[in-house]
Image (spheres, grey):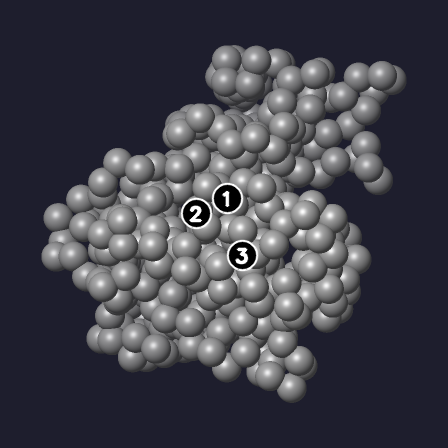
């Protein structure tokens, strides 16, 4: 194992009892602030007869109301801010792919906290001040670019704010500037890896050591693929703009779950139907309460992300609870022939199959009353297309593996290399024609 490196060991390796005391104090002060400053929360608390002073233990959190993305939309743009706008130094917004965008703000202090928390994630993923960090997340209203940028600067690394896109130039910069750490979405990392290969660049001639990837779900198979192609150690990090952006949780080099920055975020996992807590270690929807945010605190925010909590100690020495990689979002879940299917399950199967490329697309159509799913998969050998028998065997094999995993049969179509769309930011792998 590598030597343990923490950015803020006094918090990251805190004694659990002390941590819970700190969480409670911070929760109480957050509740008092939102009650005083945000009419939306005051109204909700009043309706339920909750006085922030009644919250005297962490278990009282369960009595507080949830906050949803719809609440944020209804209060667009500044309705949920807990400070006057003159104290806000930065505004970000979510992309709004699933509706109207949501707007979040940061005070000077929030930016400081955010930078520190991202610095923790980067440190956990192997980055130090000696690294040259290429940030290939989009800079803009999306929190990825600026979030990682400030964290990397905080560490003292040399930051290349290249943003996403222009993949060949990314690689030229990577060569010339001797990039040691790449930061982007996993799907963009894959596109970069494939482009390196296409350009005939020898990956061993690059200085890359670490890859810190997040902002979208990815499978263990995809991690292996990226690690092998780029010859790096790849870690997963998680966050969402409504809660802060990147910096909520991230893996250490043990790569066995994402350490949650629990001194700043209180997490719960609930059953998305009943909203009751799941059994410890079970999968459910992650709910987050911010403990230190000034401009945009959220109480029991329903993330829609499905994960489970891991409480077993980690060999790295951090004492925080971890979350498993996000399996998908409740709103990504496809219900096909009555069976719940997550795109991530399909990805996991495809990555295990020899001869397929890590590029796929899932198309859902409605034929009469029935939903039909077709999985398009790129194959490595174009030769395949001259050999009908081999092709049929491959299709049957993939279908069988998918049916075993999903419990329903889906159609599979093989396509030639480089036919499916590539992504520079978050990948869109599902095309739901039922909604078009
Ligand atoms: O994606 C923040 C971020 C930027 C995280 C860079 C990590 C790195 P949003 O655009 O608001 O914020 O999207 C948040 O993306 O609710 C998840 O569904 C998904 N997501 C984020 N990180 C991961 C991850 C940023 N590591 C939404 N694994 C979240 C799976 C992720 N899904």
Q: Secondary structure at mark 3?
A: helix
Q: Residues within 10 Å of mark 2 (few under 14, many from 20)?
A: some
Circle 3 residue = 53
| Residue 222: % across, % down | 42, 41
| Residue 375: % across, % down | 62, 28
| Residue 119: % across, % down | 34, 68
Farthest right residue in view: 368
Tell me which residue sits at (54%, 57%) in the image.
53
Tell me which residue sits at (27%, 54%) in the image.
18
Please give left or right for residue 389 compared with residue 262 in the image.
Answer: right
Please give left or right for residue 235 compared with residue 70 in the image.
Answer: left
Q: Measure the C-alpha gap from mark 3 to mark 1.
A: 11 Å
Mark drawn on residue 60 = 1
Asked if residue 58 can be seen in this view, the reply is yes
Which residue is at the front of the view, 161 or 74? 74
Circle 2 residue = 57
> What is the total number of numbered labels drawn onto the structure image?
3
Q: Measure the C-alpha gap from mark 3 to mark 2.
A: 11 Å
Q: Residues within 10 Å of mark 1 (few under 14, many from 20)?
A: few
Please give left or right for residue 317 compared with residue 98 in the image.
Answer: left
| Residue 240: % across, % down | 55, 56
- Name above or below for residue 47 compared with residue 349: below
Q: Secondary structure at mark 1?
A: helix
Q: Are marks 3 and 2 in contact (CB under 8 Å)?
A: no
Asked if residue 206 can be seen in this view, the reply is no
Q: Secondary structure at mark 2?
A: loop
Tell me which residue sits at (60%, 80%) in the image.
88
Q: Measure the C-alpha gap from mark 1 to mark 2.
A: 6 Å
């Amino acid at each position: 194992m590598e030597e343990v490196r923490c950015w803020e060991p006094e918090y990251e390796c805190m004694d659990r009892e002390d941590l819970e005391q700190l969480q409670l104090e911070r929760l109480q002060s957050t509740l008092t602030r939102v009650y005083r400053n945000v009419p939306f929360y005051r109204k909700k608390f009043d309706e339920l007869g909750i006085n922030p002073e009644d919250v005297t233990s962490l278990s009282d959190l369960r009595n507080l109301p949830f906050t949803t993305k719809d609440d944020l939309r209804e209060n667009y743009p500044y309705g949920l801010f807990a400070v006057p706008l003159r104290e806000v130094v930065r505004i970000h917004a979510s992309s709004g792919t699933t509706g109207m965008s949501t707007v979040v703000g940061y005070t000077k202090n929030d930016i400081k906290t955010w930078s520190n928390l991202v610095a923790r994630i980067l440190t956990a993923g192997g980055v130090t001040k000696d690294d040259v960090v290429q940030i290939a997340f989009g800079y803009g209203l999306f929190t990825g670019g600026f979030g990682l940028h400030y964290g990397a600067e905080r560490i003292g690394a040399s930051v290349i704010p290249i943003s996403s896109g222009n993949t060949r130039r990314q690689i030229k910069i990577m060569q010339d500037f001797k990039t040691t750490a790449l930061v982007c979405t996993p799907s963009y990392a894959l596109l970069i890896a494939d482009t390196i290969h296409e350009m005939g660049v020898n990956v061993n001639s690059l200085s890359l050591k670490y890859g810190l990837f997040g902002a979208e779900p990815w499978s263990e198979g995809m991690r292996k693929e990226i690690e092998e192609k780029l010859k790096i150690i790849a870690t997963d990090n998680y966050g969402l703009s409504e809660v802060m952006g990147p910096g909520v949780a991230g893996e250490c080099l043990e790569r066995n779950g994402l350490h949650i920055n629990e001194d700043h975020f209180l997490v719960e996992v609930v059953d998305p139907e009943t909203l009751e807590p799941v059994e410890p270690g079970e999968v459910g929807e992650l709910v987050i309460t911010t403990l230190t945010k000034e401009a945009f605190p959220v109480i029991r925010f329903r993330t829609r992300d499905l994960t489970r909590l891991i409480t077993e100690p980690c060999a790295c020495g951090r004492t925080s609870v971890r979350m498993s990689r996000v399996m998908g979002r409740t709103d990504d879940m496809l219900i096909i022939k009555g069976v719940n299917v997550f795109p991530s399950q399909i990805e996991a199967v495809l990555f295990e199959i020899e001869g397929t490329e890590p590029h796929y697309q899932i198309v859902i159509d409605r034929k009469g009353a029935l939903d039909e799913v077709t999985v398009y998969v790129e194959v490595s050998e174009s030769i395949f297309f001259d050999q009908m028998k081999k092709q049929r065997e491959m299709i049957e094999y993939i279908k069988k593996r998918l049916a075993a995993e999903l419990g329903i049969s889906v159609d599979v179509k093989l396509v030639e290399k480089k036919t499916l769309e590539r992504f520079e930011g978050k990948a869109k792998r599902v095309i739901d024609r039922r909604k078009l």
